[in-house]
Amino acid sequence: MRINQYCNFAARILTLSYTHWKMDVNNKINATIITIGDELLIGQTIDTNSAWIASQLNKIGITILRRVAVGDEWNAIWTALEEEGKQADIILITGGLGPTSDDITKPLLCKFFGGKLIKDQGALDNVIEIFTKKLNRPLLERNLKQAEVPDNCIVIQNKRGTAPGMMFEKNNVIYVSMPGVPHEMKGMMEDDVIPHLLKKYSISPVQHRTLLTAGIGESFLAEKLVKFESELPEHIKLAYLPNYGMVRLRLSDLDANSKPQIIEEWFEKLKSDVEEFMVVDEDLSLQQVIARKLLASNQTLSIAESCTGGYISHLITQMAGSSQFFLGSVVSYANEMKKDALNVPKEVIQQHGVVSKETVEKMAEGVRKLSKADFGLATSGIMGPGGGTDQKPVGFVCVGLSTKEKTISTTFQFRFDRKRNIELTAINALDYLRKNMG
Amino acid sequence: MRINQYCNFAARILTLSYTHWKMDVNNKINATIITIGDELLIGQTIDTNSAWIASQLNKIGITILRRVAVGDEWNAIWTALEEEGKQADIILITGGLGPTSDDITKPLLCKFFGGKLIKDQGALDNVIEIFTKKLNRPLLERNLKQAEVPDNCIVIQNKRGTAPGMMFEKNNVIYVSMPGVPHEMKGMMEDDVIPHLLKKYSISPVQHRTLLTAGIGESFLAEKLVKFESELPEHIKLAYLPNYGMVRLRLSDLDANSKPQIIEEWFEKLKSDVEEFMVVDEDLSLQQVIARKLLASNQTLSIAESCTGGYISHLITQMAGSSQFFLGSVVSYANEMKKDALNVPKEVIQQHGVVSKETVEKMAEGVRKLSKADFGLATSGIMGPGGGTDQKPVGFVCVGLSTKEKTISTTFQFRFDRKRNIELTAINALDYLRKNMG
């Protein structure tokens, strides 16, 4: 018996145990995500595609079993396709379709599904259009090769790039191969893959209800919710999703036949149990909650950022429509910017230091007046790794808030690295604003 | 024969084929990363841990075979440990060690390795210290339980949190379980895991040389490098790592016995082949290159950000030491901020519009004068989804640069979603600065 015969035999036996496992998860439609690329295995690229794909499939009720990343290596990709195909109903593959020679995915898929490469006219037209009309660049032979696809796949045209997607079916498992470039992959998922899956399977989406808490740790929340959790029926699951000092609580009803009011009732119970720490009873970010409040009250915000260096403004302006309530900010890294742009008196800085409640209050006031905003928010702190002292160690932060009626401030002490200190300062400054918005 | 006997039998057979595969990758030390958590499978969390771990192991010459993410589900975790253990020498596990009830990893590891849970005095002292001294919070029973570990593991004390790490060995495979909180995991890796692996295996690190290019697409680079690639010896590999209009080229020497000058010689050839597009011949980001140039020439930078909303400032201030050359910025989202803080004449905005070369030049000049910087960089554009017109569609961007000698500007047209348009504008604005710094 040769090696690959052993493999096939082993594979058939494994199928038995996997079938058993598949039934454990309520006969749902199960998907596995395979991402391909050496860059994922040497850590030069963070895989954001998988999270996005998972969230989209989750919304339409498809359960993700596993996410697997492999390199641009023939055996590794082949084994992953084979093994994951035994467990899942759908295999979504991203990456490995670029025009350079380290991309071997397409010839491999061709062989795996027993097809042969042919030129696809739609993909060819697309490549030609992109190069001649959009990029105004000469078309190279290797770009034309991108229009080749196995003759036994459904071609997914790429409206945002040159590499077409491909959909295969084998042993009742659907395999979808998409480029690794995030916006190309997202376009294909939204325009083609999700509609196809919705049509193919008729499944009710999993019902989720999520709320956001702040100011309480995961373990304290869990302690508060011991009774709640013990009373939950088996088909309703509670998950703790901690992130930078905030914890989201997500309730999921895994029973597709449940009436919506069942999860609603449990969600109401959950809300009353964590009432004092709840920021919002929806799956919103803190900045979305603030945006909503400002828009509702027709008020405006501006920010003076020292230690956060523009990060809070970035969090706000990432949201479409933020120009309706966000007027702008001053990133006052140098002391001169604090004096010249924000009118912080030189004496205040000299007497109390740059990182002080007094300075941060003047900064908040200064930016509010400069921009004529209703709220002025300000941060100043020591983010590290250098700059700490005994009185004001790395992670020491002052946050100020100024309105027409009052100017107030508070302090925090974080204990992390620069990146995380910046993120925590931003989130806590925004939460300070939220609590004091009235 | 019962199901699990079938499994064991299948597993033994599979080992044969995996052993064969292992030999394919040059008898290197191979690791697989397993991340545990439902939040990874529903897409609420982006897995940044894996990329970081991969980059650290890569540096010391350990090859990552696969990255696998599974949910908080007993069978899924068990199967992953079993299957991945057949292929890799080292299994690094993150997540699933929190104090809440959806974390089942520790009891599972205990059973998997045939140990029993005991209280570890070091871990207990740590939990008590964190709660009583640092957090000043009452200690809950579930926190004390975090100090429990299987009696057959090496405990890795957690200096940054409450959950201890655990190291096991089974069938000559090392398994390390760490918390999913990034800075806790990183601390354990740096302080304990990597030193342990370095001691255990004596392997030479893989040699990498990386350069950064801008202004040329992946396929054009590949076309330029056809000859270069065809001449490369088999043990030297070239990878294309595209990211937002920039492509990094990484050369790796997979032969542990190679002399450093071999990769050096190929790297020199590569450099001369891509000379006109090369930003830097090191693995640096664009903002690091700019920082280095400014520090070397003792010059300073300030920024006026309209459409990028603080993102460029954030990219700069993420770097420790940026206060040595970065003075600050004005995020002028409202027109009043452009006028009041940046002194952009009302008439310029009225005549040419907010998104125009004329306005962005005044913004660049304004922020340079306000902050007394050597360089003033400015952005204005339409990031979408709304706000586009026929003349100035979504993705249209103006970038201005002002120095004591001159003020210049350029335009770009991007075609993506809001998030990506912001990122592309930031990178291209920084590259415009780099090219015109002299």
Image: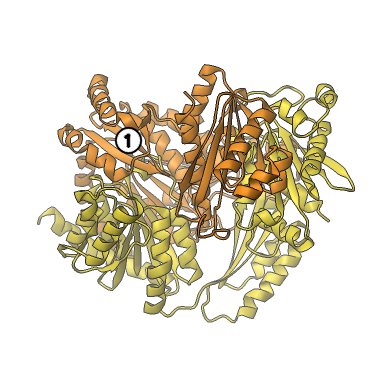
Chain colours: A orange, B yellow
The percent position of residue B147, horizontal first and vertical second, equals 23, 59
Outermost residue to the top? A297
Query: Foreground: B8 or A39?
Result: A39
Q: Is residue B193 above or below residue A422?
A: below
Q: Position of residue B29 (x, y in %)?
A: 41, 72
Residue B291 visible within the image? yes
Judge by depth and name the residue closer to the eye, A53 or B359. Answer: B359
Residue for badge 1:
A249
Please give the name of the residue rendered at 67% of the width and 43% of the height, measured from the top-left corner: B426
Q: With A203 as the anchor, is A235 left or right in this view?
A: left
Q: Residue at x 46, y 46 (%)?
A: A412
Chain name for mark 1: A
- Quarter of the image where one finds residue B128: bottom left
Furthest residue to the left?
B1
Reply above or below: A372 against A396: above
Judge from the rendering whether residue A118 lies leftward or rightward of residue B14; answer left or right.
Answer: right
Q: The residue under label 1 is which amino acid type?
A: Leu
Judged from the image, the secondary structure of the residue bearing numbered disc 1 is strand
Tell how many labels.
Answer: 1
Give the residue drawn at x 77%, y 28%.
Answer: B339
